[in-house]
Amino acid sequence: MRRTIEVALALAIVALIAVPVLAAAQKVNLVPCPYNYGPGVTPPPGGGFVIFNNSAGAKNLQMTISLKGLQPKTSYDIYLGVDAWGTPGKVGTVRTNVQGNANFHLNTAVARGTHVLNVDITLAGSGADVFELPGIHDSPMGGVTLKFK
């Protein structure tokens, strides 16, 4: 009986420690840019998603972008907006493989506080929006909200 209680207590402690880490990660699907692909306009092929993680509240943003089924052998610029979309920063470029797939990873420091994060994917060098997170053109700006301690 004592062993059962010890195991149960150990599992409860592990669950309490693990839950904040798992709760911090957020996965959001990318959508075609509504300004370039409105009604009657065929959106680009494929799609993708972004996973944001704040390392259990630390001042480190981990971001992973997965693009699937886009135009093969094509380069895309990745922009990250933090709190204000007016000045997004280009954080990298990816090139899709022959299947049109690509992955992008970023680890970067973020100031303490609660921040709204957004992503914009453009054709490399053109600035033409292809995919983005939902709500980045809304007022107030939509996006993913994470708290950094």
Image (cartoon, rainbow, N blue to C red):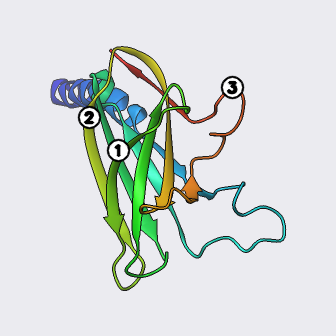
Q: Earlier in the sequence, mark 2 or mark 1?
A: 1
| 138 left or right, relative to 94 | right
- Is label 2 in contact with label 1 (beta carbons under 8 Å)? yes
Q: Please tell me whether mark 3 sits on a helix, a strand or a loop.
A: loop
Task: State the image coordinates of residue 35 (x, y, percent, origin top left).
Answer: 72, 54
- Which residue corresponds to the image point at 51% horizontal and 49% vertical from the top-left? 120
In this view of the protein, can residue 12 be seen by the observer? no
- Viewer-nearest of labels 2 and 1? 2
Mark 1 belongs to which amino acid? Met
Q: Which residue is mark 1?
A: 63
Q: Which residue is mark 2?
A: 108
Label located before the other in sequence (2 or 3): 2
Nearer the observer, 49 or 140:
140
* Picture quarter with the N terminus: top left
Q: Is residue 35 above or below residue 86?
A: below
**Residue sitting at x 35%, y 51%:** 64
Q: Amino acid at mark 2?
A: Thr
- Residue 54 found in image quarter: top left
- At label 3, the amino acid type is Pro
Residue 22, position as x, y percentages in the image: 36, 36
Q: Position of residue 86 (x, y in %)?
A: 55, 32
Q: For numbered disc 1, what is the local secondary structure?
A: strand
Q: Earlier in the sequence, mark 1 or mark 3?
A: 1
* Left or right, 31 with reference to 37: left
Q: Identify the residue under disc 3.
A: 140
